[in-house]
Amino acid sequence: MLEQNKNLVLRLYVQPGAAKTQISGQFGEGPDLRLKLRISAPPVEGAANLAVQEFLAKRLGLKLRQVVLLRGEKSRAKDFQVPNEDGNDLFQALQQMAVPGGR
């Protein structure tokens, strides 16, 4: 997670084609730490990216247009920017939604 002005960059590791869409823990360590997100959408023609965008918007109470893919259009490592004007720790809120055991 990185803060930029009044925005937050969520660093995600996305696994498309999962049986169920869910946050399943963390991936990596130190500065490479990312939140692991399993997405049921396939990695075809941007379907997984859109599914991640929709998932984040719904979970964070944002409009779809407020969730912007910055990096990783064709990679599992993705960075999404979301507004965070009130300074809430959205990354921690998402971590708390993780399914124990990641399944």
Image (cartoon, grey):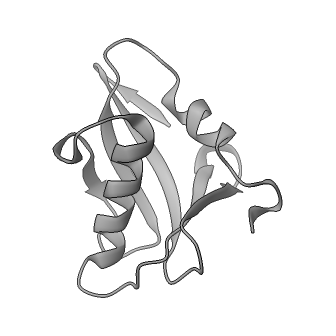
Is residue 11 or residue 38 the one in the foreground? Answer: 38
Residue at the spot x=31%, y=58% of the render?
Answer: 71
* Left or right of 88 in this view: 71: left
Is residue 85 or residue 79 the one in the foreground? Answer: 85
Query: Would residue 27 be visible to someone looking at this image?
Result: no
Residue 34 x/y as whole percent: 58, 52
* Left or right of 14 in this view: 8: left
Residue at the spot x=34%, y=49% of the render?
Answer: 80
Is residue 98 or residue 85 the one in the foreground? Answer: 98
Farthest right residue in view: 101
Residue at the spot x=73%, y=55% of the render?
Answer: 99
Query: Would residue 102 be visible to someone looking at this image?
Result: yes
On screen, 64 above or below 50?
Answer: above
Which quadrant of the figure has residue 47? bottom left
Residue 7 x/y as whole percent: 31, 27
- Quadrant of the image containing the C terminus: bottom right
Residue 88 x/y as whole percent: 47, 18
On screen, 86 above or below 55?
Answer: above
Residue at the spot x=59%, y=61% of the render?
Answer: 22
On screen, 85 above or below 2?
Answer: above
